[in-house]
Amino acid sequence: MNGYDVAKYLQKASLPLKIVVFSTFDDLNAIKAMVRFGAKGFVCKSDPIKLLKHAIDQVLEGKFYFTKNMVFSKDEITAMLQSPITWAETITNRDLKMAQLMQNGLAFKEVANCLDITTSAASKKRKKLFTKTETNSTIGLIGFLRKVGLMP
């Protein structure tokens, strides 16, 4: 289970938690998704460790905290909370499996065979995956999934 799935699970459970993300990823898409799923703080692992304590303190006081190079207005935070994030809310494990197979250099027919679907169905699935991630090529898709931490 990745961090997005954990945050979504906790959000659905409606537990009175305050989430601070401590991540190697500093991509704006990743941050928006984590805020959408309930995170109130975000600190990069490359930041000084004292910022993690500061983030926890800020979140415990009911505030949002983001690593120092990320500044968001209240309106931007509200938009993150209210606006659906297609890739984060709709990418499935099967989508990720398809992307992994494509990353591994399998021919498209082999990808379809591994997923036990027709090449036509695989083509439609790939197009949907490009739409979900707002990419238009395999290289773009893999790059995006790496940036947001869904692929190694």
Image (cartoon, rainbow, N blue to C red):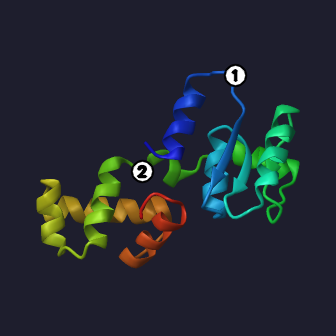
Q: Where 120 falls versus 55 (above or below)? A: below
Residue positioned most to the front:
49
Verify CB contact (< 8 Å) between mark 2 and mark 1.
no
Q: Given the image, on which type of amino acid does mark 2 rest?
A: Ile
| Residue designated by label 1 | 16
Q: Where 19 falls versus 152 (above or below)? A: above
Q: Where 135 falls versus 85 (above or below)? A: below
Residue 78 rendering spot, x and y as whole percentages: 78, 44
Q: Quadrant of residue 148?
A: bottom right
Distance from disc 2 to disc 1, alpha carbons, whole Å, reads 26 Å
Q: Name the one closer to the observer, 41 or 45.
A: 45
Q: Earlier in the sequence, mark 2 or mark 1?
A: 1
Residue depicted at x 26% and y 72%: 104
Q: Which mark is residue 91?
A: 2
**Mark closer to the observer (2, 1):** 1
Residue 83 visible? The answer is no
Is 8 displayed left or right of 39 in the figure?
A: left
Is 19 displayed left or right of 119 in the figure?
A: right
> Mark 1 falls on what kind of element?
loop
Numbered label tally:
2
Image quadrant holding the N terminus, namely top left
Q: Name the one closer to the observer, 113 or 64.
A: 64
Residue depicted at x 83% and y 32%: 60
Residue 135 rendering spot, x and y as whole percentages: 47, 71
Residue 127 rendering spot, x and y as whole percentages: 34, 65
Q: Name the one closer to the observer, 98 or 124.
A: 98
Q: Please tell me how crowded label 2 is: few (under 14), some (14-19), or many (20+) other residues with Cα within 10 Å.
A: some
Residue 77 visible? The answer is yes
Q: Given the image, on which type of amino acid does mark 1 rest?
A: Pro
Is 43 displayed left or right of 88 in the figure?
A: right
Q: Which mark is residue 6?
A: none
